[in-house]
Image (cartoon, rainbow, N blue to C red):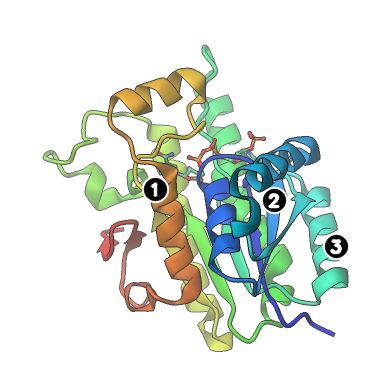
Amino acid sequence: MASNKTIVLITGASSGIGLETVALLAQTSPDFEILLGSRSLEKGTKALETLQTTHGDSLKGTISVIQIDVTDTKSILSAREQIESEYGKLDVLINNAGIIVTKPLVDTLTNLRETFETNTFGPMMVTETFEPLLKKSANPRLIHVSSDQGSITGRLDATGKWYHLKGDTYRMSKAALNMLAACHRVNFSEWGCKVCAFNPDFCVTNLTGEEGRQTRLKWGARDPKEAAAALVEVVLGNRDGDLGKSGIVHVDGGVLPW
Ligand SMILES: NC(=O)c1ccc[n+]([C@@H]2O[C@H](COP(=O)([O-])OP(=O)(O)OC[C@H]3O[C@@H](n4cnc5c(N)ncnc54)[C@H](OP(=O)(O)O)[C@@H]3O)[C@@H](O)[C@H]2O)c1
């Protein structure tokens, strides 16, 4: 029998925005059963231990770690089998895992392949695999953590704050993810799944490594808790007005152009 709790799977939740979202969801309600997705079980377990030490009794929802590498079909299938046998359904899927390739001297094709494998192919394969479990939910939701860097309209705006930032590969991967979100919105509407692409904006995380983290701090990037707070609002349905609009759901409210 399917669980009475709201089952939420967040990929790439061993750090940054994903981890903060796990924490905040667990603080929001005991009704959440949160699956902290991590490609490394060890890293995910450590992250959960730190969370429990830091937040203690304020964590009302249940959290467990699940191994999921979004570039590995076997790992995705095994995560689904585990969730199906334990809970019988999935209510919310947050495709959050993402990368920016920062290794020096990586040729363009390798960079493209690595970036798309995680940021675009991963969310598509994870969603396809979990679609049957989402269909068993009374209130299914699918959130793709995207980026304003993937907005084509934004890219062409010479007054935009990131106009001079290149990052073509990352931008392309997130633009494709935005299209995937649009396709999912259309394809899944008949069984009532609410879908969005979400922009967390510029946050202090590990996305560009330790050096990048320091640069993010220097440039006044946000606390990822702000992105987590907005994601929790999306999960709770408090942003459904924005989900009905055409565009990327923005952390500060409203939507950004595709
Ligand atoms: N931070 C920003 O300014 C910003 C802005 C716009 C959008 N975003 C998006 O927000 C999302 C979260 O990123 P973040 O900023 O929180 O960065 P982060 O701290 O680096 O978190 C990214 C997470 O994704 C995981 N991951 C990477 N490859 C994976 C794979 N193949 N399978 C499963 N998990 C994988 C990482 O795990 P490991 O620790 O094992 O590498 C990490 O837990 C990403 O999609 C990113 O593109 C971030």
Residue at x 53% of width, y 57% of height? 24
Q: Which mark is residue 82?
A: 3
Residue 254 falls in which quadrant of the image? bottom left
The residue under label 2 is 37
Count of numbered badges drawn on the protein: 3
Q: Earlier in the sequence, mark 1 or mark 2?
A: 2
Q: Badge 2, how many Cα within 10 Å: few under 14, some, many 20+?
A: many
**What secondary structure is marked by label 3?**
helix
Q: Do the numbered discs 1 and 3 sit on residues whose CB atoms are within 8 Å?
A: no
x, y percent for residue 114:
60, 33
Please give left or right for residue 232 compared with residue 57 in the image: left
The amino acid marked with disc number 1 is Ser
The residue under label 1 is 147
> Does the beta carbon of the residue at mark 1 sit less than 8 Å from ligand 1?
yes
Residue 179 falls in which quadrant of the image? bottom left
Q: Earlier in the sequence, mark 2 or mark 3?
A: 2
Q: CA distance from mark 1 to mark 2?
A: 20 Å
Q: Which mark is residue 39?
A: none
The amino acid marked with disc number 2 is Gly
The answer to whether residue 230 shows anywhere in this view is yes
Residue 171 falls in which quadrant of the image? top left
> Does the beta carbon of the residue at mark 2 sit less than 8 Å from ligand 1?
yes
